[in-house]
Structures are given as C-alpha cells and as structure tokens.
Image (tube, grey):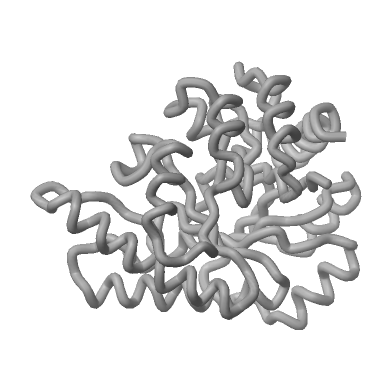
Amino acid sequence: MIKSCVTIALVPQIKTGPWIFWEDLEAGMHKASKLGFDAIELFTASADAIEIPKLKELLEKYNLELAAVGTGAGKVIHGMTLTDPNSEIRKKAISFIKEMMDFGAAFRAPAIIGSMQGNILPGNDREETMSWLAEALNELGKHAEAKGVTLIYEPLNRYETNLLNTLEAGSKFLDTLDTKSVKLLADLFHMNIEEENLEQSILKWGKYIGHIHFADSNRRPMGFGHTSMREIAESIKTIGYSGFVSAEAFPYPNPDAAAEQTIGEFRKWFR
C-alpha cells in the first residue's frame, strides 16, 4: 500500500526550505495524525537532536511511522558534502550520514542524501568527483545493509547539483556500485525540471525508486501548480510502488492549509 507522509523540519538554518511543519515536533505530529497522514519525514540538526525513546513514544501516541530522515543539516550547518575535494571533509560527511542512518534505522527508516551529495566544483575533474561519490555510496550502502535499511539518493535539478539530475542518470550510476542497498528518491519537483516525461521515467526506472517526494511544479503542495498527476499516479501504481509519498513542499499558503491540501491530493490519486 502506498502511504502518505508529511515533512517536519527542526533545523532553524533551513527554515526557508520546502517543509510543511516547523519547529514544534509534537504539534506537527498531532496535526499530521489528525489529518490522517501515515507518517512523517523528519529533518533534524543531528542524530542526537531527538532522543530515540521520546520519538518512539510520540510515534506510538499519534499512530505514525517515521518514513525517512534527512541529512541536509550536514551541509547547511557544517558545510560537508560527499564530493568535497578535501578527503577529511568527505570522511566527516560519511560519518555524519552514518549517524543519521543509525538514528533512522531504530525506526526502520532510511536516510536521504540530497544536498550532501555536493557538486563538481570549478576546476575539478568530473570522473574523479564521481569516483568520490561512488566510494561514499558504496561505504554507506554497506552500512545501510548492516542496519537492515536502505539508503536513499536524490537526483536534484541542475540548479542544485551538476552530479546526477534524472532518474535515468541515477539508475545507471547505481548499477555501477558494489552495493545494492541504495535506492533513488523520485522528487516530482526536480523531475518537473529535468525529466522529458515524468510518467515514462517512473515506468522505466521504477525498480530503483525507494521514496517519492510529492510537490507540484512550483514546489507548492500538489494541486497548486501545473503538474499533471493523473498519469504520474498511474505510473507509480503500475510499478508496484508500496513506499511513502512525502510532502516536501513549501507551507503555502500556511502549514495547516498546505497539509490539508496535500492529504486531499494524496487521497485523490492513491486511495
């Protein structure tokens, strides 16, 4: 069964980002539960920002799952990426992500690598940079396997990274890795920019998809842009996807309305 999910961010440095709920974890969970969401996707400053027993207690209280944990704070707060030319920074980035993976694994939830993938910097060699990314994902994929979870890699649009921008590019790159524990995140906002045909890309590369971000063409909640969801939803169901469809969208026009809009659109297309 495809499950609904809403984002909650607890990192002040990324407050302008595409997250539905902010700052107050329990208040966000209460609202998510009341609206009928199945899960939350959580963004924290570090792996120890929330005590695991406390989060387990709250998830049980509000009948929610933890769908995934974000790692973006590693870049936003600490400036770390997996493709930094400095090997020591790359090592620290891997360690940070492992800690987030351990946190998520306590709930059987994957960690997501988005902005921490980094970029090919001016003057740097693409082949060498991609080898750093492969090395990191192989190590992290093996760690994921040991923890009984997957690792989620997100192809971002060209304005955010020059590494891998499409499901095709991401899938072909995953095929070169030693690990099979890395999956792709199909973010409909990024795909609206980069994919020639969203539904055909999902159909062709669906076996690599491990998580979906549900946002419209303008990064507002689904239904507030020009994304044609009918064909996309059918392609997601056709590939047999049974994971989470998570609202990583701007809280437009406000968090409560954005959450209501999202769950309404989710039910329209997936229930």
Q: Viewed as shown, does residue 222 lie left or right of 164?
A: right
Count of numbered circles on the image: 0
Observer-nearest of 202 and 204: 204
Q: Which residue is drawn at 90% across and 50% down?
A: 34
Q: Viewed as shown, does residue 4 lie left or right of 68?
A: right
Residue 113 rendering spot, x and y as whole percentages: 47, 58
Residue 226 rendering spot, x and y as whole percentages: 60, 16
Q: Viewed as shown, does residue 140 lie left or right of 240?
A: left
Q: In this orientation, does residue 10 appear?
A: no
Observer-nearest of 226 and 32: 226
Q: Residue at x 29, y 42 (%)?
A: 162
Q: Which residue is drawn at 36% across and 71% down?
A: 93
Residue extending furthest toward the left? 123
Quadrant of the drawing holding the C terminus: top right
Observer-nearest of 240 and 37: 240
Q: Residue at x 60, y 40 (%)?
A: 206
57 to 66, vertically: above or below: below
101 to 132, vertically: above or below: below
Q: Viewed as shown, does residue 155 lie left or right of 232?
A: left
Residue 48 rendering spot, x and y as whole percentages: 58, 80
Q: In this orientation, does residue 229 appear?
A: yes
Residue 72 rendering spot, x and y as whole percentages: 47, 59
225 to 80, vertically: above or below: above
Quarter location, residue 213: top right
